[in-house]
Image (cartoon, grey):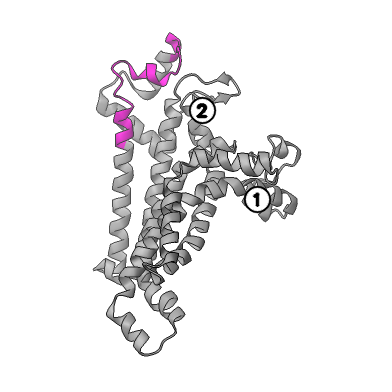
Amino acid sequence: MNIGAYVIRRALLMVVVLVGTITVTFFLSHLVPSNPAIFFGGQNPTPQEIQRITQEYGFNTPLYNQFYIYLRDVLTGNLGMSLSFQLPVLALILEGLPNTLTLAAISTAIALLIGIPLGIEAARHAGKRVDSLLRVFSVGFVGLPQFWLGIILQLVFAIWWGILPIGSYGGTLTYLSFHPIKTITGSYLVDALLSGNMGGFAAIAESMILPVITLSLYPLGIIVRHTRASMLATLNQDYVRTARAYGIPEREINYGLAFRNALPPVLIYAGLIFAGSIIGVIYVEDVFNLIPGIGYLVIYGTGTGISSSGISGSVDTPLILGVAIVTAIIYALSNFAVDLVQIYYDRRIIK
């Protein structure tokens, strides 16, 4: 199989996954043993609201026709109207997604930059004290609940020591109101940098230190463990022993020959970790009050947040379904990107 055929096959598989996700979300939203319009209408919908929702989503038509309407709307970017905010779901998601992706990308990058060297060192010293210590720390990082870790970091660094902001972009709820940042990409950190607003960039970056630490420790533990396992398998290969026999420097063997062949399995987990960070961001953004973001939308969508119209006591079904679909798209694209990177490092996967 050539590279083009492999890429096309993986792209088609990604489309199948996305269609499957859309299908599952549709039927899950129709498991309510009554008119789904009541479920979509939120808390105590009026008869007029139920009638409008019934007509809009075609709930008075056969199920296959409802699915056609749902699929058509999703493919055209119409994810419905948010019950909590009375705004299009897609617009809300596009507003919060850049900040969420920035937080997830930085956390994943830090986990890779720190976790890969630590995993290599653990493999080099397998069975020794350094290896044992790194394994204990990696297991501990994986076992720490992110919402609990975020609160502990706030308590230590913000309240006890007072050296870092407790939360919110810029350190306070009103920072962006008094220090607006020119919108370019929608990410506060990136936009401050691109617009040359170094003061805003420093304030946003400082307020993201604790959230990034909170979000990166779990994937850091995963990366250390899998890098160690992959490197151990590679270091036991005959070509590595031959390289040592020829007197090639140990650093070149570990970070050159061995690591290049140990990297593809780690890349797979890196893609999954980035996509999984979107889920972890939900807790982190809530703990640190990072608004706007996907976590902010999920909190309000589940009926536990406070919007401009007051406390949202009902589930915002269109918003939750929209976030689920966008998250699935991010997962699929992350895996597709990992497949493309793997081709560069190991052409054997296309055979």
Residue 81 visible? The answer is: no
* Residues drawn in magenta: 23-49
Crowding at mark 2 (Cα within 10 Å: few <14, some 14-19, many 20+): many
Q: Which mark is residue 205?
A: 1
Residue at the image position 69 percent from the left and 44 percent from the top:
161
Query: Relative to residue 293, is residue 206 drawn left or right?
Result: right
Residue at the image position 42 percent from the left and 49 percent from the top:
142
Mark 2, residue position: 300
Kind of residue at disc 2: Tyr
* Image spot of residue 31 (x, y percent): 29, 24
Q: Quadrant of the C terminus?
A: bottom left
Label 2 to label 1: alpha-carbon separation: 26 Å
The answer to whether marks 2 and 1 mark residues whose Cβ atoms lie closer than 8 Å is no
* Image spot of residue 312 (x, y percent): 52, 21
Determine the secondary structure under disc 2: helix
Give the answer, above or below, for where 96 lies relative to 218.
above
* Image spot of residue 263 (x, y percent): 38, 67
Q: Is residue 34 magenta?
A: yes
- Residue in front for this viewpoint, 343 or 60: 343
Query: Relative to residue 265, is residue 209 drawn left or right?
Result: right
Give the answer, above or below, for where 146 lies relative to 270.
above
Residue 202 visible? The answer is: yes
- Residue 129 figure quarter: bottom left
